Image (cartoon, helix red, strand yellow):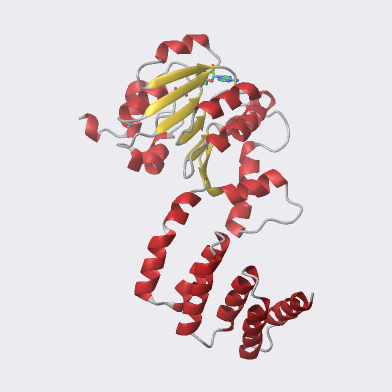
Amino acid sequence: MMQDISLDMIGVREGTDKSSLAGDYLRHYERILGHLRDKPLQILEIGVASGASLRVWSQFFRLGTFVGVDIGESCRAFANDRVTIEIGSQADANFLDELAGRYQPDVIIDDGSHRSADIFLTFRHLFPALRKGGFYVIEDLYLQYGPDAPKFHTGGPTPAEYFAAVAQRLAANYVEPDCDPQIADLVQSVDGVSFIRNAVVIRKRAEDGAASALDDVWAVAEQGQQPLTWFHLSLSLIQRNDFVRAEQAARNAIRLAPGNPHFYARLAHVQAALGDLPGSVASLERSVELEPGNPGFQNALNYAKSQLKA
Ligand SMILES: C[S@@+](CC[C@H](N)C(=O)[O-])C[C@H]1O[C@@H](n2cnc3c(N)ncnc32)[C@H](O)[C@@H]1O
């Protein structure tokens, strides 16, 4: 029955080289995207060829719509009520910008020219159009190495090296001051970079979801009354410039654990942001009193006092 057939088996039936008989990407796509099977998601794929992967997506994602992009005019033949075909080159920045203006896909797959310069250009122009929380997949990275390299690797880091550099900084949650600014930006705008054999999967950050969930988090924090929850929630609110609630969260943490110097430092942070410099100094004095040997608290107190005088 259609319902029970896996994405990989659909791939075998339709003759795509993404199936386990060749590239073996489809079981990964099912793991990553399977939960969206009955959602009206949109996939934009660079590289149509014989239309095999578009047939696979159409059969698996029953409510999906698909955009196939290729340089070959003959690919127009694969258009139908759920498939749009766009003819143009992924080496053409203007064409990519037009696509980015027209579509906001949930998934973008680069299975086109496989030349590294095109891969990077396409990513730079299309990643901003990807929906928050969406996935960007670049296939066939092996072509950048070995005998294929002269044709596909056009210089500089390979895509695998480039995205490994992003992944490393994401995992460390640290970007060195002299880091390539494009890599530094990406670390901020992705939720994950994962490698599967021959491909990289980049997940765009889903921050809107997290922000709208904050009201729910507040309600649950009130039920739990855990000081650490209020402490962390206070920082999340600071990051969203919601300083009034951030102060309340910090005070809730202090009420539940009045001996923790970090909670006063957090309160001081919010008070400074709200322009209450005397309050900020008083809170930091409490942090220093509770943990006199901590240079971080002392430095913060010295700085707050200098601001108060200024
Ligand atoms: C590997 S095939 C795509 C296979 C298809 N995604 C599938 O799984 O059935 C690569 C396709 O990329 C197209 N292509 C090559 N260079 C391109 C470029 N610069 N811009 C857009 N498409 C390109 C080719 O015409 C070819 O049809």
Q: Position of residue 66 (x, y in %)?
A: 41, 26
Q: Is residue 265 above or below residue 63?
A: below
Q: Is residue 59 above or below residue 29?
A: above
Nearest the eye: 105 or 152: 105
Q: Is residue 145 visible?
A: no
Nearest the eye: 122 or 101: 101
Q: Is residue 229 above or below residue 89?
A: below
What residue is drawn where x is 47% and y is 55%? 211
Judged left or right of residue 26, residue 287 is right
Judged left or right of residue 301, residue 17 is left
What residue is drawn where x is 55% and y is 47%? 190
Q: Position of residue 212 (x, y in %)?
A: 43, 54
Residue 283 found in image quarter = bottom right
State the residue lying farthest toward the left. 1
Nearest the eye: 78 or 271: 271
Image quarter hosting the N terminus: top left
Q: Is residue 64 visible?
A: yes
Q: Position of residue 279 (x, y in %)?
A: 63, 80
Q: Is residue 84 above or below residue 249?
A: above
Image quarter hosting the C terminus: bottom right
Judged left or right of residue 184, residue 31 is left
What residue is drawn where x is 72% and y is 56%? 176
